[in-house]
Amino acid sequence: MGRAAVSEAIMAQALAQSLTAFLITDAREADFPIVYANDAFLDLTGYNRKEIYGRNCRFLQGDDRDQPGRETVQRALSRHEPYRVIFRNYRKDGTLFLNELAIAPLRDEKGIVTHFVGSQNKVPYENLALLRDEALALLEQLTAREREVLAMMVDGQGNKSVARSLHISPRTAEKHRQRVLRKMGVGSVATLTQYAIAAEHGAMLSAA
């Protein structure tokens, strides 16, 4: 017989004491309000629990709401899918930081999604610059049509939607999709999205 399962108390303690910023939102409420944040999240953002509980974590974007990935994350939440994205966020004192957010659904014993857990990591600017340079180099390998397909993939569109927009068959759209993934050297649309976000944020930082 294997070792006993880790108790809920131990798991809660691990989450609370983790050096990675974690938060939990309630998927049963319309706006996914924050119901838990560990100390690392408070240290990262500069807020206390009273200031964040009951709010959607988009408040960390301040007035900077026009960012790539927002609509895709909203779709991932509505479809109860895990996702990873980079956002420009702001601490309580207004300081800008780049936040790599990873979200995943939590299900009850009936398999119903009741909450989402999100881990947050501050992205060093130099790491983002390297990713941006790599992304731009890979993008140069794509044809104009493949770049169109890439933009639609990052926007969360499937083969049928791409096919309708470009007036091609779904089979041809899938061929373009596979070529884009192969040329970019990645295995998922999520990684493609990270490249696209890195290029956009890297350009912003270079201009600052």
Image (spheres, rainbow, N blue to C red):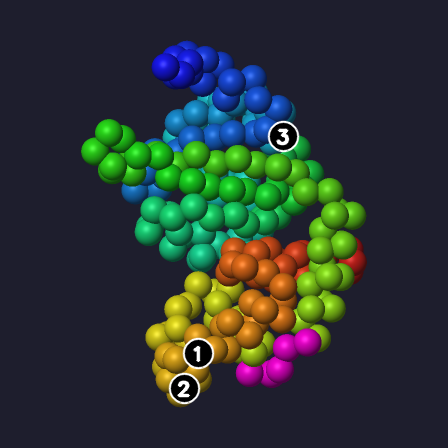
Residue 106 in the image: state x and y as whole percent: 35, 34
Query: Start and end of the magenta stretch?
Result: 141-145
Q: Please report the residue visible at 39 percent of the width from the left and 69 percent of the height from the top.
A: 158
Q: Tell me the quarter of the image containing the C terminus.
A: bottom right
**Amino acid type for the residue under numbered disc 2:** Ile
Q: Please report the residue visible at 51 percent of the width from the left and 60 percent of the height from the top.
A: 189
**Amino acid type for the residue under numbered disc 3:** Leu
In terms of secondary structure, where does tag 2 sit? loop
CB under 8 Å between callouts 2 and 1?
Answer: yes
Comparing marks 3 and 1, which lies closer to the viewer? 1
The answer for how far apart the CA atoms under marks 2 and 1 are is 7 Å
**Amino acid type for the residue under numbered disc 1:** Ala
The residue singled out by tag 1 in the image is 173
Q: Earlier in the sequence, mark 2 or mark 3?
A: 3
Number of numbered discs on residues: 3
Bin the neighbour count of mark 1 within 10 Å (Cα to Cα): few under 14, some 14-19, many 20 and up. Answer: many
In terms of secondary structure, where does tag 3 sit? helix
Q: Earlier in the sequence, mark 3 or mark 1?
A: 3
The residue singled out by tag 2 in the image is 168
CB under 8 Å between callouts 3 and 1?
Answer: no
* Residue 18 sits inside the magenta stretch: no
Residue 77 in the image: state x and y as whole percent: 37, 48
To which quarter of the image does residue 184 belong?
Answer: bottom right
Is 85 on the left-hand or right-hand side of 116? right
The disc at residue 44 is 3
To which quarter of the image does residue 6 belong?
Answer: top left
The answer for how far apart the CA atoms under marks 3 and 1 are is 42 Å
